[in-house]
Image (spheres, rainbow, N blue to C red):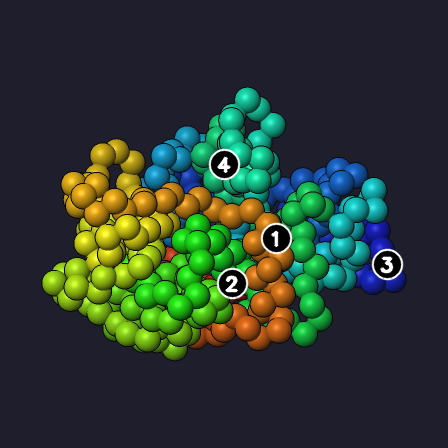
Amino acid sequence: MIPARDTEKSSLLIPAASPAVIVYKADDLRIENVALNPPRADEAVVRVAFGGICGSDLHYWKHGAAGESILRDPMVLGHEVVGNVVMAAADGTGPAAGTPVAVHPGTRGAGRVRYPAARPNLSGGTYLGSAATYPHTGGAFSTFATLPSRMLRALPANLDLRMAALIEPASVAWHAVSRAGDVAGKRVLVVGCGPIGALIVSVLRHFGAAEIIAVDMFDLPLATAQAVGATGTLRATDTDAIAAIDADIAIESSGNPRGLASAIRGTTRGGRVVMVGLLPTGDQPVPMSLAITRELELVGCFRFNDEIDDVITALDDGSLFVNPIISHEFPVSDTLHAFEVAADSSVSGKVLLRF
């Protein structure tokens, strides 16, 4: 057992190992005890309370890859985590023991990758629970996690930790909307209303979009999108109606080439299409000639930067409404079932693991 440093704020003894969610290869997900890394001076130990299952976690489980990130070794999953600091960083950086925290899972790259200074998400760095680099960067789906103190964001005392589990994906949504430009008073088409799409709807509402038309295959995600601010909904199969939307902006979050095709067709001349959903690696069949003749701006979107701080503020003051997006909660001992539920978007929104 590792004794907590701050005994006044935490009398908890930190175990040397704790249960973690590990993906070994496609269709091979396990719960195993993993040794806790002894914290360096600038690292804290966090007792994880909740972890949200992300689409990338599902891709690693189902396919052994998430886009261009190919799984080569077993890896602890998880980057959407919140919890409480049980051992503060020895160098005095970061939150004190006992502080509830969200986690910013990104680390800026230090290599020779060229990128705009204001966009460190493009720096070629690492991300918790990602196989984008090798050796892979292990995630934080574990009861205890040793994390750099710079990753930790102290949470307001009245912010429910269960709801705070949406902070990381909401930051992705916030970044996506920022890539769209000024959305106030605009007509916006959101294609794909899983958890990220629903969060995008909520952020669009926060920033004053006049019309938000949500598109999906299933009743539940469409109902969730309406609950958080969509002004209209369409079935993904109703391609003629989607093409007639004539949106100022489309945000594609299905991660499906047919969804991207619908986003292009549903966007007005001179409009912008923000591509959030992670498409499979390789070439994709989409109507590029239409994008060319309409002079559409096709904009990529990858993770986020410091939007997490704005998300925490908006959740705390109530201006960002996300409550209906969480649909299920499972104990970590029932992880496989949780992943199966999360993989079926017809019955689930955001699925949480409870640690």
N-terminal of the pair, mark 4 or mark 1, is 1
Element under label 4?
Answer: helix
Tell me the amino acid under the disc marked 4. Answer: Leu
| Spatial separation of the CA atoms under disc 3 and disc 1 | 23 Å
The nearer-to-camera label among 2 and 4 is: 4
- Residue 233, quarter of the rendered image: bottom left
Tell me the amino acid under the disc marked 3. Answer: Thr
* Residue hosting label 3: 7
> Which residue lies at the image location 44% right of the left edge and 58% below the top edge?
182
* Residue hosting label 1: 103
N-terminal of the pair, mark 2 or mark 4, is 4
* Residue hosting label 4: 122
N-terminal of the pair, mark 2 or mark 3, is 3
Element under label 3?
Answer: loop
The numbered disc on residue 292 is none
The nearer-to-camera label among 3 and 4 is: 4
* Residue hosting label 2: 166
| Spatial separation of the CA atoms under disc 2 and disc 4 | 23 Å
Picture coordinates of residue 283 (x, y %)?
A: 22, 34
N-terminal of the pair, mark 3 or mark 1, is 3
| Spatial separation of the CA atoms under disc 4 and disc 1 | 19 Å
For mark 2, does the 10 Å Cα neighbourhood hold few (<14), some (14 to 19), or many (20 or more) residues? many
The nearer-to-camera label among 2 and 3 is: 2
